[in-house]
């Protein structure tokens, strides 16, 4: 079995079982590798330890559920591998700068429709830019947009195995469907990065993004709150300006690395192609 296949098995297992046994030994078993070497292989190929990845994924899943669902905070914590409410609150606070309950509440209060025009513009700066054509190398994803992280992680494993980092630009996610108009299980997206080389590495697919005018909203904060940016863009900016979107999907350009950046400092450009 190839190393990238072993890591892909582990990543799928973590995303599918955030409340399961995700210890070093357990993940080594999923990878079918000796635990003595598993840690070094994972760290060398991904740039973080498996424990750091598990913690990041668990809290990312929890953050998304806190904003999308109404079930209790403690239940979400248990479902994401934190059976002790205090340990969940502490871990979440260390990553997101506030308790899970405060994150849920500020997410509700921060909805764009509750802000004045000045507040929206301050929070979500939007520019019309002439964007270049791009080729994106990555993997297709189907299902919840909040779970696209699994496909990103798997794409990075392939990039590492092929030693193709030098030919990659910023990470890019392409989103083909409106999540409010299509069942979550049927949502189509693409996880990858700008490809600046010649042939796309084996194991990855290529998608071309046409260049042209686009509205670019710069969003600062956790990925779990990106929907607020889309609401501001489609619910306020488009009606107020009269611009018409092109018949092309939105895409997101991720300007920093979630493995090394605090969630509140993440920067994402939401790009809406215009006619």
Image (cartoon, rainbow, N blue to C red):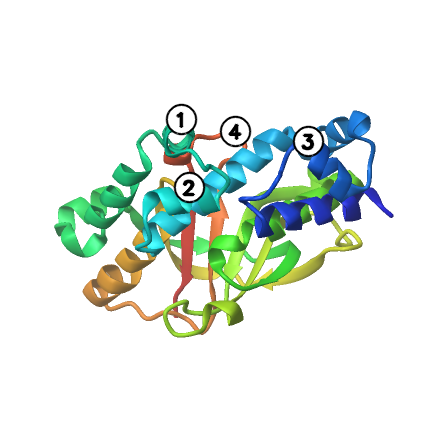
Q: Nearer the viewer, residue 144 or 159?
A: 144
Q: Which residue does the numbered mark 4 point to in the structure image?
A: 260
Q: Which residue does the numbered mark 1 point to in the structure image?
A: 94
Q: Which residue does the numbered mark 2 point to in the structure image?
A: 77
Tag shown at residue 24: 3
Answer whether labels 1 and 4 touch (C-beta < 8 Å). no
Q: Position of residue 100 (x, y in %)?
A: 33, 38
Label 4: how many Cα within 10 Å (few below 14, some 14–19, many 20+): few
Q: Position of residue 228 (x, y in %)?
A: 30, 53
N-terminal-most mark, 1 or 2:
2
Label 3: how many Cα within 10 Å (few below 14, some 14–19, many 20+): some
Q: Nearer the viewer, residue 239 or 259?
A: 259
Answer whether labels 4 and 3 touch (C-beta < 8 Å). no
Q: Nearer the viewer, mark 1 or mark 4?
A: 1
Q: Toward which corner of the image does residue 273 lie, by quadrant?
A: bottom left
Mark 1 → mark 2, Cα distance in angstroms: 15 Å
């Amino acid at each position: 079995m190839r190393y990238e296949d072993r890591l892909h098995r582990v990543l799928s297992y973590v995303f599918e079982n955030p409340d399961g046994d995700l210890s070093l030994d357990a993940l080594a078993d999923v990878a079918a590798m000796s635990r003595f070497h598993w840690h070094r292989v994972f760290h060398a190929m991904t740039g973080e330890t498996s424990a750091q990845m598990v913690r990041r994924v668990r809290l990312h899943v929890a953050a998304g559920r806190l904003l999308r669902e109404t079930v209790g905070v403690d239940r979400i914590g248990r479902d994401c591998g934190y059976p002790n409410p205090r340990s969940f609150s502490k871990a979440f606070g260390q990553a997101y700068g506030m308790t899970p309950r405060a994150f849920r509440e500020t997410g509700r209060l921060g909805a764009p429709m509750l802000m004045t025009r000045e507040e929206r513009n301050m929070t979500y700066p939007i520019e019309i830019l002439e964007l270049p054509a791009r080729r994106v190398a990555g993997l297709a994803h189907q299902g919840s947009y909040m779970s696209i992280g699994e496909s990103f992680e798997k794409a990075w494993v392939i990039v590492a195995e092929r030693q193709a980092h030098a030919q990659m630009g910023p990470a890019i996610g392409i989103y083909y469907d409106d999540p409010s108009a299509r069942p979550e299980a049927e949502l189509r997206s693409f996880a990858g990065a700008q490809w600046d080389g010649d042939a796309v590495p084996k194991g990855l697919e290529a998608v071309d993004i046409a260049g042209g005018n686009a509205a670019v909203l710069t969003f600062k904060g956790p990925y779990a709150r990106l929907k607020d940016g889309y609401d501001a863009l489609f619910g306020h900016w488009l009606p107020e300006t009269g611009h018409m979107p092109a018949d092309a999907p939105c895409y997101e350009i991720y300007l920093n690395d979630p493995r090394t950046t605090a969630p509140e400092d993440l920067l994402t450009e939401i790009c809406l192609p215009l006619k």
